[in-house]
Amino acid sequence: MVNLSLEKLSPPSSNRLAEDLPILGMDFARWVGAEFPDSPNKGIPMITPARIESKVGSRHGATAVEFAVAISIFIILVLGMVEIGRGFMVTHLLANAARNGCRTGILASSSNTDVNSAVDTTLTNEGLSGATTTIKVNGVVADVSTAQSGDQITVVVSLPASRATWLPGAHILTGNLSGEFALRRE
C-alpha cells in the first residue's frame, strides 16, 4: 500500500524535482507546484487531472454508419425468418385443406365438386385463395365418384408462393407451396 500525504511540501533546492521524487508515474514537480515558481500556491499540493485524448467525438459518424449497416442486415434476417415461417404455416394449412377434401372424397356419395368445395371452404376460412386442387384415384387423375371401395384417393392442394407471402415485393419464397393427403375409399 502506498501512503501519499497531501501536507504542505516545499520543493527541494535542486532543479531536478521530477527526477528525484517520482511517485507512481505522476509528474511530481507539477503536483507540488514547483513548475510555477511565481505561484502563490508554491509548495501546496495541486492535483490536476491527466489529459486524456478522446476520440469519442470523432466516432459519431462512424457509429451511425455501423449501426445502419448492422440494423439493415438484422432486419433482412428477421423478415426472412418471418417469411420462411409463413411458408411452413401455409404448407400446413394446405395439407389440412387436402385432408378435409380427402375425408369428403372417401364417402360413397361424394364427387369432385364436393371435394373442391370442402378444400375451398377450408382455405377461405384460413384466409387463402387461388389454390389449385388435384384429385387422384389410385395415382391417376379421376373423379372420386368412379372409385371403388378400397381405392386410394389422394388430394393435392397447391398455391403459388406469391399468394401466401406477407411481405409484398419480397421474393424469398418462390414457386408453389403444396399439401397432400391420401385415404382409402370406404
Image: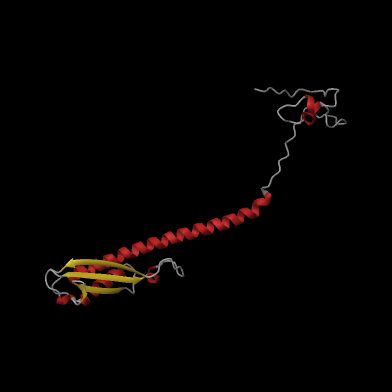
**How is this picture coloured?**
secondary structure
- Left or right for 124, reference 62: left
* Residue sitting at the far left: 149
Quarter that holds the C terminus: bottom left
Q: Is residue 172 above or below residue 58?
A: below
Residue at image point 26% right, 74% down: 134
Q: Is residue 44 visible?
A: no
Residue extending farthest front: 139
Q: Is residue 40 visible?
A: yes
Identify which residue is drawn at 79% across, 31% down: 30
Residue 71 % position (x, y): 53, 57
In this rendering, is residue 3 above or below 35?
A: above
**Residue 27, x across and y down, in percent:** 76, 31
Image position, residue 182 (x, y; %): 21, 66
Instruction: Residue lying at the far right in this picture: please name it.
Output: 38
Q: Quadrant of the N terminus?
A: top right
9 and 147: which is toward the camera: 147
Q: How many marks?
A: 0
| For residue 70, side relative to residue 51 (left or right) | left
Quarter of the view holding residue 101: bottom left
Instruction: Give x and y (percent) for residue 12.
Output: 83, 22
The residue located at (24%, 70%) in the rendering is: 155
Q: Quadrant of residue 61?
A: bottom right
Q: Residue at x 67, y 23 (%)?
A: 2
Corner quadrant of residue 41: top right
